[in-house]
Amino acid sequence: MKFMSQSSTRALAMASVCIGIGGWVASPALAQDDAGQGDAAEQEERVEDDLHTRQVDYEGKIIVSATGLKQLDLLAGTSVLEAADIQNNLSGQVGEVLAKLPGVSATSFAPGASRPVLRGFQGERVRVLVDGLSTADVSNTSADHATTIEPLTAERIEVLRGPAVLLFGSQAIGGAVNVIDKRIPRRVPEEDFHLDAIVAADTASDLRNVGASLDVPLGESVVFHVDGSFRETNDLEIGGLQIAPALREAIFELADEEQAEGEVEEAEELREAAVQSGVIPNSATQTWTVNGGVSFFSGDSIFGASVGFYDTDYGVPGRPGTEHAHEEGEEDEGEEEGEEIVTIGLEQFRADALADIDLGDGFFQRLKVRLGYSDYTHTEFEGAETGTVFDTESFEARLELAQSETGPSRGSIGAQYSYRDFAAVGEEAFVAPNTTEQFAVFGLQEFGPGPIQVEAGGRLEFTDVASDVVNASRNFTNFSGALALVYETDEALRAGVNLSRVERAPSAEELFADGPHIATQQFEIGDPDLGTESAWGVEGFVRGKIGGAELSVAIYQQWFNDYIYLSGNGDEEDGLPVFVIVQDDADYFGMEGEITFPLFSKSDVTVLADLRGSYIKAELDDGSAIPRIPPVELLGALEAQTDAFDIRGEVQWFGAQNDVSTFETETDSFALVNMSVAWRPLPSRENVTVLLSADNIFDVVGRRHASFTKDFVPLAGRNVKASVRLSF
């Protein structure tokens, strides 16, 4: 790797600046409490605020970490999953955990690899973060690459949509998922130790899953943390035939051709694959994680660090009737033709540091510094042989200054630096080794005490992308900005409109791709001369309370200039259709929303109705459809809540998607019926939750349209799940 040799000076300089500024501005605040101890009640209150201002929704729940801002309406489509929600939607990949939220889908490539899809965007237009920093994996490079997040040990997951996601980079043009984990302690437990644990099992994958985290205080100023998890599944059970009708017909035709050529055994294998049912072969997974951290508390300030390791092995289901491109035509004499079983072994070492510093009563109230380093490797195995190895080393630093709330405006300013050194070695390494370096400054401001407020944000970004192998280097300077006008009623109802202009530099994968991409069954060719992708956007929203109902609705439109996408040109290379990366104008329109209202409330029993929905239409300038856009999705649920029990039944309906691009297959409509019962057996009603649920009760075959593998990797069939969550 070149990271330490080529960019150590720049990275260390940025880290030194962050730490140096942190130490300099912290000194007055730290002097206020030389003993490093504060009032216990004030400390607990500070902890509950997570050491910086956070937006609160109409239910009083924390929505999103937002340094320096109270409402942050620029995040008009924001959602949150707390610990109970994560337990209800537990999965090994964060994309599946979030898939029931309005406007959210998942790539669902395989049980071991599923990334979030936000408002129809995926890949390079969605950022997946850990406390504001990148996950530093290569899940953006290809849909078959796992996201290195263990939802089991997450404290909460924030889904950020709307123009303010530009705070986290232009790569978040479609949105961002921010996972707040427990690696760096944010509070001092009142007890001798604090333990969170969860145990889970299911029937569709024979899941065996356990995770736990432990915080141990040493006095009032130091807290040690450790957490770990283990997850193992077998091949996923499904409700019917594995192969979609159109692909099944193509496989039968291929079998007839093999039969006519005298390849009887191969023809029979193809016919057997076409009618495979009940299970997805080669879809098993095994994942384990371990993390440790420590935090030092001084007054209202925190300094912490953590290290962690993520390890997963998972199968990549093969598309029946195809072979790896590099095997085509290379069969040795006497060897039997056939596709090797492909598995991926992934490892990541990660180190993080945090300084969250109280600056006293001056113009700036808090300083937050985040540093992250990652060493990532994953290997694609073909049977017992090593295929392609992806190796990435990265460093990231983020600094934010939050203003005090005594003046006419509130807000924050900050800077961010990131460096990534990427290399892929092997016959299917379709992207040349490359480096990406980025520096940005950003800010958000909120004006007006109400009922009318104005919010403004901006980000200036400098990006350098280079590859010595192809002797190419590109530099980009991009600016993104957003403006919001908001009206708030006395009844806690907020309505407003956001305007945005966002620019995104092309990624190294879009610039330098040139080779067979087996995960997408395409031979991809990038363009080193790509220009900046940009978009104008407008978004209207309403959220809050109307009577007893709580709602959140957003309608948005984006007009893209020089939208970057893959386009088939009709050629074939290495047995795969050739797709070239080109630019054209494009439009995205969508709406999403949810409403919850009480149907019955008496004594300690409340019955709620929960309705959610989303719609997206995306097309290029010539009117042709953009591929893998999720169809209309609706969810309706009834939930009865008591002190000890919550009982929920829901139906999630997915419409047919017939508006498809060239070379893309259509998907049929389907509905999933789910039920769950949550029991809190202890008098405190908070420390233990036992959950029993049944998903896809009628065992239907469903295919997620956003998935590259929808024709041969359907969703799980009937699945009975049980889990126990503990917190002491």
Image (tube, rainbow, N blue to C red):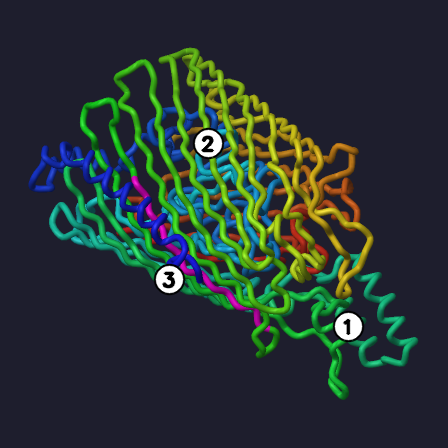
Tell me the quarter of the image containing the N terminus: bottom left
On screen, residue 708 versus residue 209, left or right, reads right
372 falls in the magenta region: yes
Q: Are marks 3 and 2 in contact (CB under 8 Å)?
A: no
- Across and down, in percent, residue 451 comes to 41, 11
Look at mark 3 in the image and give the residue it sits on: 309
Q: Identify the amino acid type marked 1.
A: Glu
Q: Residue at x 36, y 44 (%)?
A: 397
Look at mark 1 in the image and give the residue it sits on: 272
What secondary structure predominates along the stretch shown in magenta? strand
Whether residue 664 is visible, yes or no, is yes
The number of callouts visible is 3
Q: Is residue 69 above or below residue 429?
A: above
Q: Nearer the viewer, mark 3 or mark 2?
A: 2
Q: Identify the amino acid type marked 3.
A: Phe
On screen, residue 409 versus residue 364, left or right, reads right
Q: Are marks 1 and 3 in contact (CB under 8 Å)?
A: no
Could you say which is closer to the camera, residue 67 or residue 534?
Answer: 534
Q: Identify the amino acid type marked 2.
A: Leu
Q: Earlier in the sequence, mark 2 or mark 1?
A: 1
Query: As drawn, which residue projects farthest toward the front?
Result: 471
Mark 3 neighbour class, 10 Å CA radius: few under 14, some 14 to 19, many 20 or more: some
The part of the chain drawn in magenta is 369-381
Look at mark 2 in the image and give the residue it sits on: 460
- Across and down, in percent, residue 666 comes to 77, 47
Q: Earlier in the sequence, mark 3 or mark 2?
A: 3
Q: Is residue 563 above or below residue 402?
A: below
Q: CA distance from mark 3 to mark 2?
A: 33 Å
- Across and down, in percent, residue 58 comes to 42, 26
278 falls in the magenta region: no
